[in-house]
Image: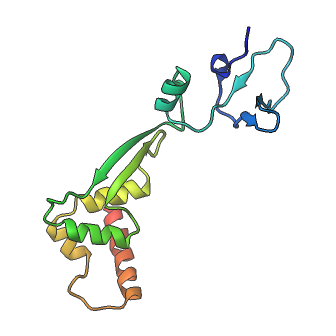
Amino acid sequence: MLFSPNISNYEPFQLSTDFDTEKDRSECVAWRRFSAGEQIFIFYGARPNCEFLVHNGFVPPENEYDTLALRLGISHADPLGARKKALLDVLGLPFSGEFLLCAGAEPVDSKLRTFLRVFSMTEGTLKGFWPFSVKMNSMQFYSLLFKKFIILFMQ
């Protein structure tokens, strides 16, 4: 029987397989001692379930690295789009792109949460949030922006 990593049992631990280009072979490294006849496990890396299914033909029952990619963006038809895009730019976030929902207790990270808050802002929220009509230096502006985001996240 030829050994194939895909038939070994998966266990999240440390990456244990690699390809040695000098020896032109795949190698598995054990991170602990195994007794004769004991079952071995392989960690395939931090990958979402869709990659496991496509590349390995199985999905781990509990995968802490599972993600779901969401393609989101501010619409060109949004009448507030220019202001939302400008605000996202100041916050260092794209106005269009891929965001990830992650497995676990906190599936929405701060980037996605911030994007969604800006995405759903109304004209009233934007007016109260962004000091478009106020002349100030960049340090004052970022300080005010930070304070307003703290208040927004506390709601």
Image quarter of residue 31: top right
Residue 41 horizontal side relative to residue 34, left or right: left
Q: Is residue 137 above or below residue 132?
A: below
| 21 relative position to 6: left or right | right
Look at 49% across and 24% down and name the residue there: 53
- Seen in the picture, residue 3 relative to 130 is either above or below; the reply is above
Answer with left or right where residue 100 lies relative to residue 130: right
Quarter occupied by the N terminus: top right
Q: Quadrant of residue 29?
A: top right
**Where residue 84 sits in the image (x, y, percent)?**
25, 67
Which residue is painted at 29% across and 72% down in the image? 86
Q: Position of residue 146 (x, y in %)?
A: 39, 75
The answer to whether residue 151 is seen in the rendering is: no
Question: Is residue 84 in sight in this rendering?
Answer: yes
Residue at point 84% right, 22% down?
A: 34
Residue 148: x, y in percent?
Answer: 32, 74
Q: Residue furthest top?
A: 1
Q: Image point 31% across, 66% down: which residue?
A: 152
Residue 142 found in image quarter: bottom left
State which quarter of the image contains the C terminus: bottom left
Query: x%, y% of residue 123?
Result: 15, 69
